[in-house]
Image (tube, helix red, strand yellow):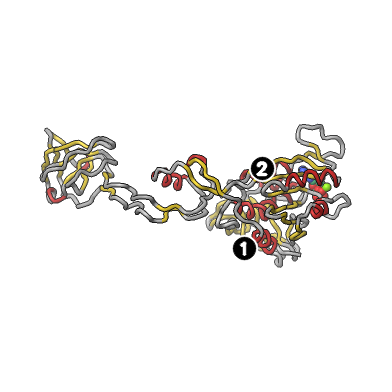
Amino acid sequence: MLTYEEARGKILDRVSPTGVERVPLDAAAGRSLAGEVRAPGDLPPWDNSAMDGYAVRSGDCRGEALLPIAGYQTAGGPDAAAVPKGGAVRIMTGSPIPEGCDAVVPFEEAEERDGSVRVPAPVRPRQHIRFRGEDVRAGERIIPEGTALRPPEISLLASFGRTMVPVYRKPRVAILSTGDELVEPGDPPGRGKIVNSNTHSLAAAVVEAGGDPILLGIARDDREDLRAKLSEGLAADVLVTSAGVSAGDRDLVRDVLAELGVENVFWKVLIKPGGPTAFGVAGKVPVFSLPGNPVSGLVTFEVLVRPALRRMTGSPRPVKIPVKATLAEPVKKKTGKTQFLRVMVESGEEGYVARTAGDQNTGILRTLVLADGIAVLPRERTDFAAGEKVDVILLYGMA
Ligand code: AMP
Ligand code: MG
């Protein structure tokens, strides 16, 4: 049976970015850049004033100086004429520096009276000027391939006039829940029935991971129904199924996937929760068969499906970097499996502190609701002392 790291490795070996599309700049935030961006020009494009004040020649202001105001320069306004020696230009932030000037004196450091400005102290050459190309030089690589575009990258792209951006396409992720016992939320849950929460929690997880979910509803534990809905799912970029992969009499998902030509890559992993997880591929389509327990489904999504989606959405770093957290209390586990412990994370004097969210039974969703992260307890270890550092995968918006 594969370890957690081996299983994740096998998955990542089988997935690649979904493809590229061009989207408007304002739709690009959060997407990964396909290809790198080089600066088409200098930024700023010309020398300009960093302050509201007076543009001067520093050579005229070696000591106290009185300079007649020879011109007026607003941001976006017409260019002031070249400044004669001994003169100054009243200038606003962002305006081009008039020819001949090499420094700006802020309003706060000068005094204007009767058409002249008195500069009481010496002026350093280049002071309060933003020089052409000091931020970015033409031709420089400004955004590397695969970067998740955040507001600062959007700012750079906009500054260079970009209106369309090439990004990796969002994978379409088909989600199929399976089980005779399932009813949809809103339908009367008769005796023995269970509300299908997995379709909806997994769809939310897909959106959060940058994919587009396709909800295929429920397939009954019946070969015909499974065959029809699983084939529909194989038309997407990724297929995620829930339940029916354990050793129960009606656990038919793997069987029917094999009939449909899905190559089994692995079944069962040395992890808890999520042991019965299966993974296969049909051509380029990865197929994840997650266990039916709502907690197991979301935890396996986090540790096995998310890295695949990150790679498919073009991220150069498919595995999220875990944080180190100090255990607030001792924890015991059995040897043999990597355990994903649902923890609440706080900030302590020496960084993060992780405290168990409570009952770790896979039937308890409440402790996943309380959790901010998943502590990854290594397979071969059994006893963890309070004060020990462990790796924690922070969940969702928690950072
Ligand atoms: P199974 O993997 O089919 O043995 O299911 C394991 C457990 O998860 C059972 O208690 C199921 O009722 C429950 N379960 C299966 N599918 C879902 C679902 N879509 N939503 C919520 N619970 C489910
Ligand atoms: Mg079942």
Residue at x 72%, y 56% (from the top left corner): 281
Answer whether residue 245 is visible to the viewer in this image: no
Asked if the residue under mark 2 is in contact with the one under mark 1, i.e. CB atoms within 8 Å, the reply is no
Compared to 153, does 266 lie above or below? below
Q: Which of marks 1 and 2 is nearer the N terminus?
A: 2
Q: Position of residue 112 (x, y in %)?
A: 16, 36
Measure the C-alpha gap from mark 1 to mark 2: 39 Å
Q: What residue is pinned by disc 2? A: 213
Q: Where is residue 78 in the image (x, y as percent from the top left)?
A: 23, 36
Residue at x 53%, y 58% (from the top left corner): 350
Residue 52 relative to residue 286: left or right:
left
Residue type (three-letter) at the residue carrying disc 2: Pro
Disc 1 Cβ-to-ligand 1 distance below 8 Å: no
Of residues 125 and 283, the one drawn nearer to the viewer in this rendering: 283
Circle 1: element type: loop
Q: Position of residue 97 (x, y in %)?
A: 23, 44
Residue 112 relative to residue 197: left or right:
left
Q: What residue is pinned by disc 1? A: 388
Q: Position of residue 96 (x, y in %)?
A: 25, 43
Q: Which mark is residue 190?
A: none
User: If the image is split into quadrants, where does the N terminus sit?
Assistant: bottom right
Nearer to us of marks 1 and 2 is 2
Circle 2: element type: strand
Answer whether residue 193 is visible to the viewer in this image: yes
Residue 136 relative to residue 3: left or right:
left
